[in-house]
Amino acid sequence: MYGCEWDDETGEVKGYQHFGFDGEDFIVLDLETETWIAPRREAVLTKLRWEKNKALMAQKKNYLTQICPEYLKKYVNLGRSSLMRTEMPSVSLLQKSPSSPVSCHATGFYPDRAAMFWTRDGEQLHHDVDHGEILPNHDGSFQMSVALNVSSFPAEHWGKYRCVFQLSGVKEDHVIVLDRAVIRSNRGNPLLLPLIIGAAVAALALLLIAGVGLLVYRKRNGKKNTPSPASSAELTPLEGQH
């Protein structure tokens, strides 16, 4: 494994080259000291032989600190519109039940260098807060959440709490106030239950009516298509006729 790292802010460049064997490091290049590190005893002879080859070391150093960073800068510049873009998320407040923590959920942001936290009167909270990990979305963006335990908060104090989302490269924060009116829950609206039941009953009634109608139609149609004995006789050819 070999490559280079470039810090676009400081201009610092780091190169690396590792060799492995049987799932473990075998020999590792140290560019700062221009030496090889041998984690295993079997690599000592290789270390000594490679360190004597000054031309090989100069070649590797030139590639890892000069050529590789130039290619890296070129690729970053070509993909700048995609790699260097910033996308703010949609932020929602979620709660499973009235006694559950309120989760501040942000999704659709890019890049993944982001932070999200709860505040009270402008001060960041550390207690009663559960920070989730930054997770990838299927479209290349990211999501994260931070939950706040509100079970001990008086209702009149909710307006003092804020969920703050910060994205690297964006100066303005995304802030949402803790408000019961905007919390999304999977509890559902109790008023919708009779409507849902009524719609289900109506749909079932329509299916039963359609089924009965289909059976009646089939019976009537079957009677029409069944030939009578007289008509059957008329269709039977008489013997001896030519």
Image: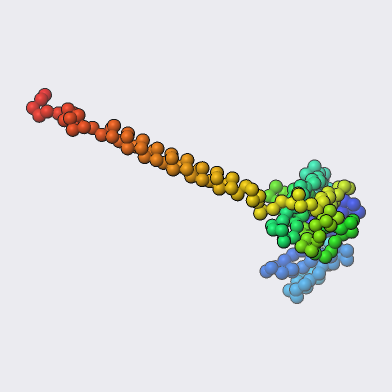
Where residue 134 appears, as percent x and y from the top left, is 76, 57
Residue positioned most to the right? 10
Residue in the picture at 82% in, 51% down: 177
**Residue in the foreground of this view, choosing between 29 and 83:** 83
Quadrant location, the C terminus: top left
- The reply to whether residue 18 is in sight is yes
- Residue lying at the far left in this picture: please name it: 240
Q: Going 78% across and 44% down the picture, which residue do you hit? A: 82
Report the front residue among 104 and 1. Answer: 104
- Quadrant of the image occupied by residue 28: bottom right
Is residue 39 placed above or below 201 in the rendered structure? below
Report the colour scheme: rainbow
User: What is the residue that sits farthest to the bottom in this orientation?
Assistant: 41
Q: Report x, y in % for residue 124.
A: 87, 59
Q: In the picture, which quadrant includes the N terminus?
A: bottom right
Residue at 87% in and 51% down: 8
Report the number of numbered marks. Answer: 0
The correct choice, above or below, for 43 with respect to 237 in the image is below
User: Seen from this angle, which residue lies furthest top?
Assistant: 242
Can the viewer see residue 75? Answer: no
Q: Position of residue 151 (x, y in %)?
A: 76, 62
- In which quarter of the view is residue 209 placed? top left
Question: Is residue 236 positioned above or below 120 on the image?
Answer: above
Give the residue displayed 88% in from the left and 63% down from the top.
32
Q: Nearer the viewer, residue 53 or 209?
A: 209
Name the quadrant containing residue 240. Answer: top left
Compare residues 153 and 241 and report the one nearer the observer: 153
